[in-house]
Amino acid sequence: GDSVTQMEGPVTLSEEACLTINCTYTATGYPSLFWYVQYPGEGLQLLLKATKADDKGSNKGFEATYRKETTSFHLEKGSVQVSDSAVYFCALSERGSRGSQGNLIFGKGTKLSVKP
Amino acid sequence: NAGVMQNPRHLVRRRGQEARLRCSPMKGHSHVYWYRQLPEEGLKFMVYLQKENIIDESGMPKERFSAEFPKEGPSILRIQQVVRGDSAAYFCASSPRDRGSSYNEQFFGPGTRLTVL
């Protein structure tokens, strides 16, 4: 079945460092891809998305490009801030999978800690 | 427009008791999804409902778990005779009526953290 694999954390960076969180996927069709962020004690918030190959999603300085040839959707940011400390989840959604309308399949999450 | 509401935020139950988790979707949203997050794990899909219908329950355990989304009122996830392994965070998400687009964004609630003693 469909699955998402993302790099394990925790990841600890200093403020203004570059961030890359790797994410690869396995899917039978042509999924949409997402990055969600979870701040402590809160629910998930959509960070960015890409719905077809070569699309680039971007938000709040974060970017990810849908690479069909490598089945990847790595999250990047050029300069992280303390406020970026959170858990980041890569996810995919295949419309019509098992008859459902896009339930999300998540990776295990990567905890990011940014130190001042 | 209020976001997705879940209550209670924290729920403690003893083994064998029942747990009822509530989810009020965003206004105008008719699709509800339930996910479970075990410690140190990602979220796992449990069930997808529309008003008065269960569309996909492929992620629900076969026993003790049930879900509903009545015509009026919140969606309810019910766990009967809870066991310690049910301890997790349960998240609800809602999305608007399907308009045939490739994807309708899911908006997540803050979750209910269930602890079974």
Image: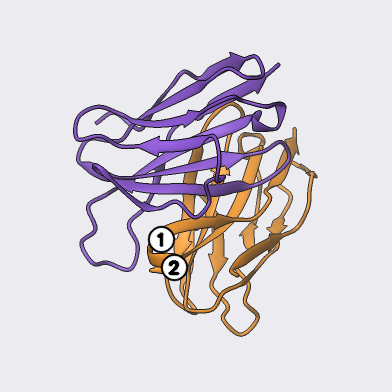
Residue closer to the observer: B65 or A38: B65
Please give the chain letter of the residue carrying mark 1: A
Q: Identify the residue position indicated by label 2 in the image.
A: A97
**Rendering colour (chain B):** purple
Quadrant of the rendering where the N terminus of chain B is positioned: top left
- Number of residues whose C-alpha sits closer than 10 Å to that of mark 2, classed few (under 14), some (14–19) or many (20 or more): some
Q: Is residue A51 left or right of residue A20?
A: left
Spot occupied by residue A27 in the image (x, y as percentages of width and height)? 56, 74
Q: Is residue B14 visible?
A: yes
Q: Is residue B31 left or right of residue B28?
A: right
Which of pointers 1 and 2 lies earlier in the amino acid sequence? 2
Q: Which chain is orange?
A: A
Q: Is residue A8 above or below residue A31?
A: above
Residue type indicated by callout 2: Ser
- Furthest residue in direction bottom, as rendered: A69
Answer with the quarter of the image where residue B117 lies.
top right
Residue type indicated by callout 1: Gly
- Identified at 31% across, 35% down, the residue is B25
Spot occupied by residue A82 in the image (x, y as percentages of width and height)? 67, 35
Of tags 1 and 2, the one toward the viewer is 2
How was the colour assigned to the protein in this rendering? by chain
Residue closer to the observer: A92 or A49: A92
Please give the chain letter of the residue carrying mark 2: A
Q: Is residue B87 above or below residue B42?
A: above
- Identified at 23% across, 67% down, the residue is B100
Mark 1 and mark 2 in contact? Answer it, CB < 8 Å. Answer: yes
Q: What is the count of numbered marks?
A: 2
Q: Identify the residue position indicated by label 1 in the image.
A: A102
Spot occupied by residue A38 in the image (x, y as percentages of width and height)? 57, 38
